[in-house]
Image (spheres, helix red, strand yellow):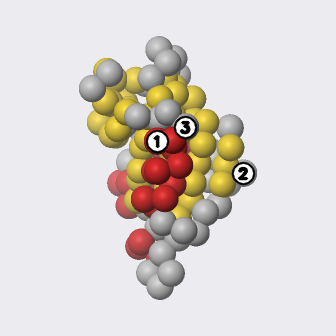
Amino acid sequence: MSISYHYATVAKAIDELREKGFDEDFNLEGNYLSSHAGRFGDSEFDIEHIYFYEGESNPDDEATVYGITSIKGHKGILVTGSDVFITNTESSIIKKLLAHHNK
């Protein structure tokens, strides 16, 4: 996995991942990641790339862009703001995503 601390833009991180073949759009749905390819639990995907974005003047502008590959081979992107971690701390998906923030 590649963890990058980019301070450019979220759009730039998404563009870079799209160029690497991450074409699905993942969303958090309860305790799953979902896309048009299906729903995936925390053991059904790997995080391959992480881009951290910090807003210049407001901590609420923080975002994280994940490049994710499912066990079925679907490659996609998940974008989260800092608020998703506060409201879903019991989710196994969130725990998996947060595990990489402190490395």
Eye-nearest disc, 1 or 2: 1
Q: Which numbered circle lies on residue 18?
A: 1
The residue that label 2 is drawn on is 103
Quarter-of-image position of residue 84: bottom left
Q: Residue at x 49, y 59 (%)?
A: 12
Residue 97 percent across, percent down from the top left? 53, 43
Horizontal placement of 2 versus 23: left or right?
Answer: right
Residue 101 percent across, percent down from the top left? 62, 53
Extreme residue in the top direction: 72
Between the residue at mark 3 and the residue at mark 1, the CA separation in whole angstroms equals: 5 Å
- Is label 1 in a helix, a strand or a loop? helix
Extreme residue in the bottom direction: 57
Between the residue at mark 1 and the residue at mark 2, the CA separation in whole angstroms equals: 25 Å
The residue that label 3 is drawn on is 20
Eye-nearest disc, 2 or 3: 3
Extreme residue in the right direction: 103
Q: Earlier in the sequence, mark 2 or mark 3?
A: 3
Amino acid type at mark 1: Arg
Whether residue 24 is visible here, answered yes or no, is yes
Q: Is residue 36 above or below residue 23?
A: above
Quarter-of-image position of residue 36: top left
Q: Residue at x 52, y 28 (%)?
A: 69
Amino acid type at mark 2: Lys
